[in-house]
Image: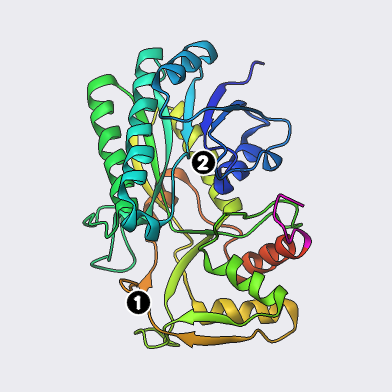
Amino acid sequence: MTKPKLLVTGGTGYVGSFTVRALQDKYEILIVDNLLYGHEDAVPNIKVVKLDLSNGPRLKELMAEYKPEAVVHFAAYIQAGESVTNPTKYFVNNVSGSLNLLNAMVEAGVKKMVFSSSAAVYGNPENLPIKENQTKNPINPYGDSKLMIEMMLKRYHMAYGLNYVALRYFNACGAELDGSFGEDHRPETHIIPLLIRAYLKGEEFIIFGNDYKTKDGTCVRDYVHVLDLADVHKAALTALFDGLTTAEFNCGSGVGFSNLEIVKSLEAVTGQPAVYKFGSRRPGDPDKLVAGVDKIKDQLGWQAKYSDIKTITSSAFKWHKNHPLGYNK
């Protein structure tokens, strides 16, 4: 039987590469990526076309040539802090690039998309756990860009019959359980890889703030293992092929871990103390962010399997210990 064709944007990145590897048995995959931040070594044996989504004409040609049955759209810049100081970069790449992609899909008659959105669309939430229908009030241009794309998807569905699932990630983390593939952002801004790198180098790690209204005074976040995120893309694609038209889902564990719990988890995995101290708060950091996951459980039958703190930390530690230079080993 012929496999359905997928076009995957940003498929050499962190979540994208894990998802591509999880989908390759069921789908024929073509990756489109500008390769500024991704790693081709993360997607062995998958064809990659080096192409920036700013090149609308070439994107339309490729879409017409390849004729995918669905698109999985990861390609985006993701650093929230950078987006505040350089919003142009985020609106041009994330929003304008997505518009080019949508127009290429419409012209080629491609009617299905799974979109990599973000919990950043909520901003500082009104209530916890965060439900999909809560007010959307992003606090940075990165979150604005993701919300704008969701709005475009709704309008393209209404006007052109483009069906989509928007997946709002919480904190993606972890690695393959054997440490063979993992997280390699440059620059890195996520707490778990930064903590592990500091530990492996014998450096002191700084936890930003210990006076939050949480059980130990440090920020609490919902961490979702990248293997679980790869699995949810499978479920979303299956739902689209089975006739789902539009949906937005939170992708999280539904459980929060504090920064200090992450440190203690690494100590438990390694059997050695970590060197850390508390620094000042970062402006705008909420006390606690946890996903409401009832909707995705009910409608997609999905829930996190690998997002316990031990699996997250131990898999990430294996990756960074075995690949101190990331994919540039």
Of callouts 1 and 2, the N-terminal one: 2
Dot 2: what SS? helix
Viewer-side residue, 143 vs 271: 143
Q: Looking at the rendering, in which quadrant would you find the N terminus? A: top right
Tell me: 241 left or right of 161: right
Secondary structure mostly seen in magenta is loop
Q: Residue 22 at what x, y percent from top left?
A: 64, 40
Give x and y (percent) for residue 4.
57, 21
Magenta-tinted stretch: 322-329
Q: Quadrant of residue 33?
A: top right
Which residue in the protein does label 1 denote? 287
Front-most of 248 and 317? Answer: 317
Q: Say which amino acid is labelled 1.
A: Asp
Residue positioned 33% across, 33% down in the render: 96
In magenta segment, residue 206:
no
Question: How many C-alpha atoms fall within 10 Å of the one at disc 2: few (<14), some, or many (≥20)?
Answer: many
x then y, percent, for residue 47:
66, 26
Which residue position holds label 2? Answer: 233
Confirm whether residue 245 shows in the render.
Answer: no
Residue flagged by tag 2: what amino acid is it?
A: His
SS type, badge 1: loop
- As rendered, which of 324 and 31 lies closer to the eye? 324
Disc 1 vs disc 2: which is toward the camera?
A: 1
Q: Let me know if residue 211 appears in the view.
A: yes
Image point (58%, 48%), residue name: 14
In-image side of 329 versus 279 (left or right): right
Disc ID at residue 137 = none
